[in-house]
Amino acid sequence: MSPPSAPLIIHGAPASQPSRAVYWLCMIKSLPFELKPLGIDGMGPDAPLLKLNPAGQVPTVEDGTFAVYEMPAILIYLCEKHGWNDLLPTDLSARTRVHQYLHFHHNFTRRATLELMAPFVTVAFAERMKGTPIESRISDPNKLENGRSCVRHVADLIERGFFQDGSTHLCTSHATIADIACYEELAQLRWAALFDFEGFPKIQRWFGEMEQLPFHDPAHRYNTVLGDIRTEENTLKRFLEASAAGVIALGA
Ligand SMILES: N[C@@H](CCC(=O)N[C@@H](CS)C(=O)NCC(=O)O)C(=O)O
């Protein structure tokens, strides 16, 4: 375990939804951290990261000599280590609801990025990514409609399956790490002008609740600077400027 003074190292990037979940949690709880962005555009794995995480993905965190990857595992680790019981409740049923959501997340909510956000973001890398599977999604003429249909399905499952008993948040009456994880996938679609959540009143009300959490704005500076990538095509310049703004906002 690390000495108390050593800041957590987060290998991550502002453009990465699970990375934002990890550093927003740290900001909410005033836990010092150092963000290690990857490569020039923050997206390519480097050799030190590959040693910690064979998939080379972000987020991966280093807490002294202990390293952990996969966003839900990181969020749970930090809550358990620091006793953040508000964000990971000790009550068995509330805690189980949080775990339930975090398992649901990988197969459902995460698709909001893979099917809708990523095809519009990765346009910026079209030249670099020729021949990769992502390239085929970029050229899909139905990418907006297909992505929206996927998100509509996920939003419907969340609207009907969570917010139980009139709760304002996914699993309990206040924000937990489930809300943070989910928010990073869904809220980005509004700033990017890809999906407006019309017809999902519980999710819309919940967006308003989540915006009140500490450090919401600096944690999402990448998204607000990037803005609409549906009517204005994303470019490498836009992506890099938004990523840089996202990193600067964290320093401030
Ligand atoms: N299941 C992982 C997903 C991580 C992930 O998809 N990371 C992306 C960025 S958002 C990444 O590192 N992509 C680069 C790569 O796969 O090489 C988690 O929850 O942490």
Image (spheres, rainbow, N blue to C red):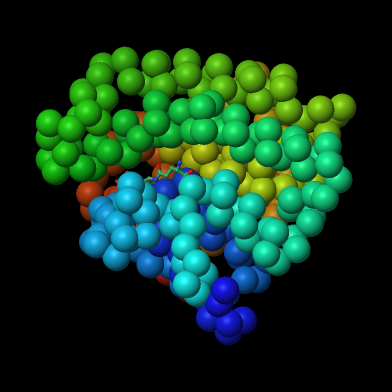
Report the residue at 26% width, 24% height from top.
137
- Does the rendering let one see residue 11? yes
Report the residue at 41% width, 21% height from top.
147
- Does the rendering let one see residue 217? no
On screen, residue 127 above or below 214: above
Q: Picture coordinates of residue 54 (x, y %)?
A: 32, 51
Q: Picture coordinates of residue 129 (x, y %)?
A: 16, 39
Report the residue at 39% width, 26% height from top.
115
Quadrant housing the N terminus: bottom right
Q: Which of 180 and 233 is in front in this view?
A: 180
Q: Tell me the quarter of the picture where residue 170 sits.
A: top right
Report the residue at 27% width, 38% height from top.
122
On screen, residue 166 above or below 199: below
Q: Which of 108 and 3 is in front in this view?
A: 3
Q: Nearer the viewer, residue 187 or 113?
A: 113
Left or right of 22: which side holds 148? left
* Ligand number 1: quarter of image: top left
Left or right of 186: which side holds 209? right
Q: Tell me the quarter of the picture where residue 104 sits.
A: top right
Q: Picture coordinates of residue 202 (x, y %)?
A: 73, 28
Please count the marks in the image. Answer: 0
Q: Which of 92 and 250 is in front in this view?
A: 92
